[in-house]
Amino acid sequence: MNIYKFWNDILEQNADAIRGYFDKNAYINWHCTNEQFNVDEFIIANCEYPGSWNGNVERVEKINDIFVTATHVYSQNQELSFHVTSFIKVVDDKITAMDEYWADDGIPPKWRLDKQIGKAICSQ
């Protein structure tokens, strides 16, 4: 499975292409919001989400039959930005399970800013 093409199709909200990556019995867990989706529901959640999206896969690790990806996802107008960590189980070149953790990008909390600890990973 081409994990970069998968993410490209997700970002382009290409429902037909997305469906082709999944086993018909696959499930997708979004742990941060305590939701589980079947493939059809996952496609609705991704493809009917408002706006147009860009992003880039920042890291990929493969452990046996699981891809672990860290991906930056952001709206084309740059108003929204997220990082998602995904654990994608692939069997016979089809996704059978996916566990994702989505986080809103933002500034550090005030208490850390007040302590003047840490520094930016990269300039934005």
Image: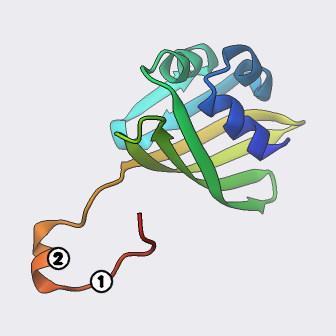
Left or right: where 14 falls relative to 85: right
Q: Position of residue 22 (x, y in %)?
A: 75, 26
Q: Position of residue 17 (x, y in %)?
A: 76, 21
Q: Residue at x 73, y 14 (%)?
A: 16
Q: Which residue is mark 1?
A: 118
Residue type at tag 2: Arg
In the rendered image of this protein, does residue 80 appear above or below residue 120?
above
The figure's colour scheme reads: rainbow
* Image quarter of the N terminus: top right
Disc count in the image?
2
Q: Secondary structure at mark 1?
A: loop
In the rendered image of this protein, does residue 79 appear above or below residue 18?
below
- Between 83 and 38, the one nearer to me in the picture: 83
Q: Residue at x 68, y 45 (%)?
A: 88
Q: Residue at x 47, y 42 (%)?
A: 74
Q: Position of residue 62 (x, y in %)?
A: 77, 60
Q: Residue at x 64, y 53 (%)?
A: 57
Whether residues under marks 1 and 2 lie with C-beta atoms below 8 angstroms apart, the answer is: yes
Left or right: where 12 falls relative to 53: right
Q: Position of residue 118 (x, y in %)?
A: 30, 83
- Can you tell which mark lies on residue 112? 2
At label 1, counting other C-alpha atoms closer than 10 Å, the crowd grade (few under 14, some 14-19, many 20 or more) is few
